[in-house]
Image: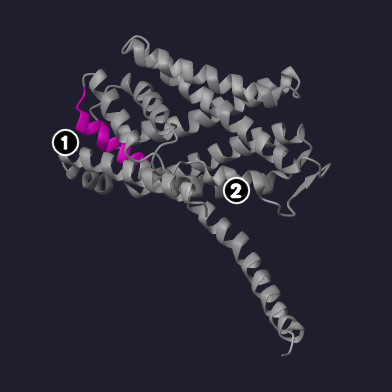
Amino acid sequence: MPWRTIAVGAGQIIVTGSLLTVIAVLWGPESFTSALHGLPWWSFLAAGALGGLGVLMQALRWRIVARHHAINVRLGAAVARCWQAAFLNSVLPGGLAGDALRAVDDSTDASVTTRRGALASGFASVAAERLVGTAVVFTAGGLVLLPLAPLAGLGCLGAAIVAALVAGRWLRRLPASEIVQVVLLSILGWICFATLFMLCVTVLVPTAPAAVLPSSAAVALAGMSVPVGVGGWGIREMASAWSFTLSGLSAAEGVRVAVGYGVLALASAIPGAVIASLRVIPRVRRARRFAARQRPQNRRQRPTA
């Protein structure tokens, strides 16, 4: 692994650890423990259902974009790859490693019309659909923040415009009707994860006004979409604490909700860990068999003195 990749990953881990340490100092470690203890068992079932729906929306929009980049992926395979990517994004630094693997994966569950530029097409299709989702997330955060914190709101809207413009480079091949479908699927995916966040608010801060639920969810999701740290931890809690103070609520309550959301989001991505294991184990076995065949050949080919 290149030393720069290692350095960037280590830096993101340090950033996450530093932010969580600051949060624990400012609002106490009980913000973390109370969130864990306050989540009922049925919230994990709801997280699995909402997370699965979000992954399905992503898989559907990816298939639309990929098809116009000469890549055909079955729906089941697309869901499996997106779920695997969601899990890897949750546990690896940067939040993009899973999607990078999805772009370069050469498994037989996808077919490429032409091998020429296959790798570039893979990256283009994944980057385009992810950037459309990012544009939706930052648009929602920007619209919520404009009346409360105009500068931050403009920053979010600016990030959304940049993401949309970059995605547009790889969406030119799509007809307008399918671009609309990709955007609508991105909005539906955002609704799934925003609903999960609002569920956490309802469970962990039952006294919070209903009007606060959508705005706090929009700001927290925008915060965790910044590709810094591990799985959105730290920056999501900071964003949630800030959004709660803007609504006149306690920052500690915002941290507690964000921690609860992080736990439920990670739990909803567990099927991706199972899928990753099922996809990796056969490859490891094939690699071992290949290495075992190569060793006798190397011995026979070794020149004698």
Of labels 2 and 1, earlier in sequence is 1
Residue at 49 percent across and 39 percent down: it is 50
Residue at 62 percent across and 49 percent down: it is 80
* 251 relative to 295 in the view: left or right: left
Label 2 Cα crowd, 10 Å radius (few <14 / some 14-19 / many 20+): some
x and y, in percent, of residue 3 in the image: 47, 51
Which of the pair 272/103 is nearer the observer?
Answer: 103
x and y, in percent, of residue 296 in the image: 72, 84
User: Can the viewer see residue 173?
Assistant: yes
Residue at 36 percent across and 46 percent down: it is 13
* 20 relative to 283 in the view: left or right: left
Q: Is residue 147 above or below residue 241?
A: above
Label 1 Cα crowd, 10 Å radius (few <14 / some 14-19 / many 20+): few
Dot 1 corresponds to which residue?
A: 26
- Give the extent of the magenta segment: 249-261
Residue at 68 percent across and 76 percent down: it is 289
In reply to whether residue 57 is colored magenta, the answer given is: no
x and y, in percent, of residue 132 in the image: 58, 26
Which of the pair 280/177 is nearer the observer?
Answer: 280
In reply to whether residue 250 is colored magenta, the answer given is: yes
What SS does tag 2 mark? helix
Q: What residue type is labelled 2?
A: Leu
x and y, in percent, of residue 259 in the image: 31, 41
Dot 2 corresponds to which residue?
A: 101
